[in-house]
Amino acid sequence: MPKESREFDVIVYGATGYTGRLVAEYLKDKAGLKWAMAGRSLPSWRKCAT
Ligand SMILES: NC(=O)c1ccc[n+]([C@@H]2O[C@H](COP(=O)([O-])OP(=O)(O)OC[C@H]3O[C@@H](n4cnc5c(N)ncnc54)[C@H](OP(=O)(O)O)[C@@H]3O)[C@@H](O)[C@H]2O)c1
């Protein structure tokens, strides 16, 4: 897929885990970067969101 047509620059898969959270913390301050978090488990996401 061409870079220009991508919705996100980076998607952090497994963002509910220890390492994923560190990566998300790092990325959240990167101005202009389009990024997203993804995961497989809704219960994990509920814990992560609180
Ligand atoms: N912790 C460290 O200090 C450290 C240091 C260096 C390298 N690493 C490496 O980094 C990786 C993650 O470690 P961690 O300590 O961050 O682990 P963790 O806290 O247990 O997190 C694992 C993450 O991966 C997801 N996951 C696990 N199995 C999956 C699967 N089959 N499909 C999709 N998602 C899956 C989990 O999602 P769910 O919530 O859905 O389970 C969770 O978000 C490991 O390979 C580890 O060896 C860790």
Image: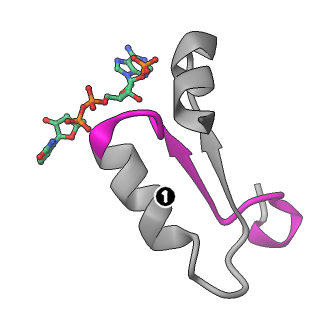
Q: Is residue 4 left or right of residue 32?
A: right
Residue receiving disc 1: 24
| Residue depicted at 52% across the width and 70% down the height | 27
**Crowding at mark 1 (Cα within 10 Å: few <14, some 14-19, many 20+):** some
| Residue depicted at 36% across the width and 34% down the height | 17
Q: Quadrant of residue 18?
A: top left
Task: Establish if 22 lies above or below 12.
Answer: below
Q: Residue furthest bottom?
A: 31
Q: Quadrant of residue 10?
A: bottom right
Measured as percent of width and height from the top left, residue 35 is found at 67, 61
Question: Ligand 1 sits in which quadrant?
Answer: top left
User: For the magenta stretch, what is the residue range?
Assistant: 3-18
Which residue is at the front of the view, 4 or 50?
A: 50
| Quadrant location, the N terminus | bottom right
Measured as percent of width and height from the top left, residue 42 is found at 63, 14
Q: Is residue 15 left or right of residue 30?
A: left
Task: Establish if 47 lies above or below 10.
Answer: above
Measured as percent of width and height from the top left, residue 29 is found at 56, 80
Is 26 a magenta residue?
no
Which residue is at the front of the view, 5 or 17?
A: 17
| Quadrant location, the C terminus | top right
Q: How is the image coloured?
A: one colour
